[in-house]
Image (spheres, grey):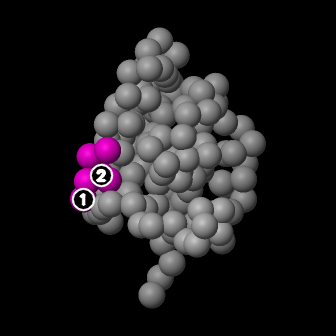
């Protein structure tokens, strides 16, 4: 079976993107990291095939993209994003997409939208009991 997720061939691309995150991505990451949204784990700069997602929750199969100006500069960029999203959605992964301006001007609405989507996806995919020693197991 072909590996689709976090391919070694994309490792350097992911590393570069993590080192060069945008201000909007950094803001969203402060809310997603360390299971702050309904105890769900999000990963940053996660690759699927040769596409890299800004954020991804593997358990819920939820991708989050923060789009800067480069996503809207020309028709090719818009078409690329549509093709990329369609490919990823065919794998059963849901998408949330926000513009940088949304993050900067109404961050609470962005976080609320993410939280609501996580709640919706958790209903069909309830959390598994933890086997962590810290929780007395």
Circle 2: element type = helix
Say if the magenta span includes residue 121.
yes
8 relative to 62, above or below = below
Q: Which residue lies furthest to the bottom in this view?
A: 1
**Measuring 24% from the left and 59% from the top, which residue is drawn there?**
124
Residue 58 x/y as whole percent: 46, 61
Please give the label number shown on residue 124: 1
- Residue 64 in the image: x percent, y percent? 44, 43
Q: What stretch is highlighted in magenta?
A: 119-124
Q: Name the residue under label 2.
A: 121
- Which residue is more in the foreground, 59 or 89? 59
Residue 31 visible in rendering: yes
Count of numbered circles in the view: 2
At a point 66% along the width and 36% down the height, the residue shown is 21
Q: Does the magenta stretch include residue 17?
A: no
Q: What element carries label 1?
A: loop
The residue sitting at 67% across, 55% down in the picture is: 13
Left or right of 12 in this view: 41:
left
Which residue occupies the foreground of this view, 1 or 37? 37
Most prominent secondary structure in the magenta stretch? helix
In the image, residue 86 above or below residue 65: below
- Assess disc 1: are there few (<14), some (14-19) or many (≥20) residues with their C-alpha within 10 Å of its C-alpha: few
Q: Quadrant of residue 98?
A: top left
Q: In which quarter of the image is the N terminus?
A: bottom left
**Residue furthest toward the top?**
105
Residue at mark 1 to residue at mark 2: CA–CA distance: 6 Å
Direction front: furthest residue: 136
Are the two marked residues, 1 and 2, in contact with CB atoms closer than 8 angstroms? yes
Neighbour class for label 2 at 10 Å: few (<14), some, many (≥20)? some
């Amino acid at each position: 079976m072909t590996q689709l997720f976090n391919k070694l061939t994309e490792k350097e691309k992911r590393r570069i993107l993590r080192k060069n995150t945008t201000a909007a991505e950094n803001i969203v990451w402060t809310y997603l990291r360390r299971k702050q949204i309904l105890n769900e784990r999000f990963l940053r700069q996660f690759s699927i095939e040769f596409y890299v997602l800004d954020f991804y929750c593997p358990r819920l199969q939820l991708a989050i993209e923060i789009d800067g100006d480069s996503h809207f500069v020309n028709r090719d960029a818009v078409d690329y994003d549509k093709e990329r999203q369609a490919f990823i959605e065919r794998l059963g992964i849901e998408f949330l997409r926000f513009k940088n301006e949304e993050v900067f001007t109404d961050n609470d609405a962005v976080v609320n939208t993410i939280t609501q989507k996580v709640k919706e996806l958790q209903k069909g995919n309830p959390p598994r009991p933890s086997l962590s020693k810290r929780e007395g197991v």
